[in-house]
Image (cartoon, rainbow, N blue to C red):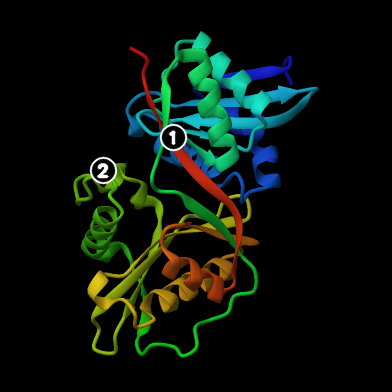
Amino acid sequence: MRSSGWYLTEDVEDFLARAGGFLQARPAEHVMQLTWAERVRTRGRAAFGRAPVFGVLEEEGQVSGTFYHLPPRSLGLSPLSPAQADSLAARLADLGHSPTSVGADHDTATAFAEAWQRHTGATPKLRDVRVRLYRLGDLTPPDPHPEGRARVLGEGDLGQAVFWCGEFAKAVGEDVTVSAETWPSTRYADKRYTLWETPDGTPVSIAGMNPLLGGQVQVDIVYTPAHLRGHGYAAAVSAEVSRAALAAGAQEVVLFADQANPTSNALYQRLGYRPLSDWSGYDFVPAD
């Protein structure tokens, strides 16, 4: 290890060599660091436009924190104490970095937002959407089970995947164009998708899961069109994807849910998911 403090690098392999053990020791709380580092590693830096930046906090010879930033996306932080968040804000400000937003567990995001305001004068604005991170305990399939079956989408189903992910993106207000042309550059391209189909073959709900990383799989996305909700389709396809993640060797299965949606939060808890932490995002309004 080098001397204590924040070490920054644009080399994802360097980042993982330094922090991989730290991230994988507690994969649930580092799910976003693991996910985005793997995307950069497999797709290459050029896939995300401006060069990504990764950071490792080393204290007394041990890794104690990390961050990643893929502009224009949010600065993503591992859990940090207020002092650690302040030291990161000071370092980034001194180096001329200008993240437009930050996302992390609520306490860490708030500590950094307040520190960024102190060091730069930027005003933090808490985003309306806040999410809760869940981890699967004992999987409990839905009972009663809706009629129909699960079908895993393959390479020949790109059109189906593009359509459903586009509908999901619109439903959650994500500012992204999902089409056959843009697909390779979206976050949706590295997932495995499962559709729930009614007995006549009509697709009614979709769930995706990210690759196995650090012994963990993140379930992402889950979507049912509004006019088809209330029939148990989301529960069925979520349970099927969760089962598939365990069958693939996942020691932990996690997912995020919008805290403002009591239906989805209750659904995941019925399936056996347990709350781990609440996450928030802040946008920064630069000082005049």
| Amino acid type, callout 1 | Tyr
Q: Depth check: give the residue in front, 272 or 206.
A: 272
Element carrying mark 1: strand
Q: Depth check: give the residue in front, 138 or 282.
A: 282
Q: Are marks 1 and 2 in contact (CB under 8 Å)?
A: no
Q: Is residue 12 visible?
A: no
Identify the residue position indicated by label 2 in the image: 175
Front tag of 1 and 2: 1
Q: Is residue 243 visible?
A: yes
Element carrying mark 2: loop
Residue 247 spot, x, y in % from top left: 57, 71
Tell me: 173 left or right of 24.
left
In terms of sequence position, does the residue under pointer 1 or pointer 2 come before the other?
2
- The residue located at (30%, 62%) in the rendering is 155
Q: Depth check: give the residue in front, 167 or 40.
A: 167
Quarter assignment of residue 50: top left
- The residue located at (27%, 57%) in the rendering is 171
Tell me: 107 left or right of 152.
right
Residue lying furthest right in this view?
A: 60
Tell me: 60 left or right of 197.
right
| Amino acid type, callout 2 | Asp
- Classify 142 as above or below 35: below
Tell me: 68 left or right of 166.
right
Identify the residue position indicated by label 1 in the image: 282
How far is the residue under mark 1 from the one under mark 2? 16 Å
- The residue located at (46%, 55%) in the rendering is 210
Residue 271 spot, x, y in % from top left: 54, 75
